[in-house]
Amino acid sequence: MSPMAPSTLHPPVLDNYQAVVAEFCEFLTVAVHTILYERNIYPRTSFLSARKYNYPVRQNRHPQVCKWIQDAVAAVEAELLKGTISRTSLIIYSPTTIPLERFVFSTAHFPQVPRNEALTTLEVPDPDAPSLPPNNPTNNPPSPTTTTNPPTPLINLHSQFRALFARLSTQTSTLTPLPPHCTFTLAIELHERHVQGPDGDFAGQAPLSGNSAWIAAEPGLQPREEGEEVGVGESSAETGGSSSHGLGSSSGGAEGNGGSGGGAGEGNGGSGEGRGKERESEPGYVSQKGKYLGGGRTVPVRSVEAGPFVMEVWVEEGRGKAEAVREAERERELVMGGGGEGE
């Protein structure tokens, strides 16, 4: 028997934009199932125990719920590959369709790559590499071995995902409990750029043409200043002259109040709102964003940075959440016969 040849297999790496998008969409699918479990949108008995990234997670076992999430994430992936998305949000609504919570995944710092170069190998600059003066006439491009780092192994990214899910469980346990019968949807915020790409589409335009899955989000969820908000669901909402767009309405919720979480985060909880707040400190600044954006309270979850994959995650609790919870309590008391006369 001839000796076994040495293995030429290499660990998976983040070496192109399509790999970055694929990892984000796989993460987003797990995150949506996790949030639905933590926030009791469906009964906890409808979730299976599973493992992802070598970490215990939950997955809803209802086929229609899984199909809805799969289709929604696929629509997000299509826009990410166009370079249009700045943020993706999971929005939880009250039974009267008031946004109560927004789980925001900011991908504004993903690489900006033309669609026809999604498989082109990315170069990650080495911050420690020496640089020549820009006005030096002999300033030829340095050698790739000195200007770029090797591709980021996926194991580095997955270890940060584990820390993020642990932190997400911890942070959601600090949120105010939700009223029963809440619903949810996915939304995307578009970059404000309107640059025509080589294939003739516009990176910043809302994807509303033809048979697009996206529909306009309601005015209260329109950024108007930094981009366009898009929501996922079954029916279009009134836009009131706004220029934003979205993907269908929310999925049905089940009974349950609030979510509990366990486990300690493995890493730092990055501030998810810092970069978005910079302009608000400028003199004379007047916010143009919708009334449901920003919320009454922002809870940072964690930042993730692994080579070209840079993401920030935070949660916004809506300003109308307290009133929605009180209204649900009054209705419950009336049903139980203990409410007496209304206010």
Image (cartoon, rainbow, N blue to C red):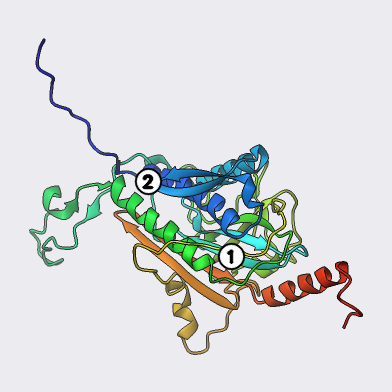
Picture quadrant where residue 128 is located: bottom left
Residue furthest to the bottom: 283
Q: For the point 31% across and 46% down, which residue is it?
A: 154
Q: For the point 67% across and 42% down, which residue is it?
A: 210
Q: Where is residue 93 in the image (x, y as percent from the top left)?
A: 69, 62
Circle on res. 340:
none
Residue furthest to the top: 1
Residue designated by label 1: 102
Q: Which amino acid does label 2 sit on?
A: Asn
CA gap, disc 1 to disc 2?
Answer: 27 Å
- Comparing 189 with 25, the one in front is 25
Mark 1: secondary structure: strand
Q: Where is residue 232 in the image (x, y as percent from the top left)?
A: 65, 52
Q: For the point 45% across and 66% down, which residue is it?
A: 301
Q: Which amino acid does label 1 sit on?
A: Arg
Q: Number of marks in the image? A: 2
Residue 24 visible to the viewer: no
Circle on res. 54:
2
| Left/right of residue 306 with respect to residue 313 in the rendered view | left
- Comparing 105 with 237, the one in front is 105
Residue furthest to the left: 138
Q: Position of residue 108 (x, y in %)?
A: 44, 61
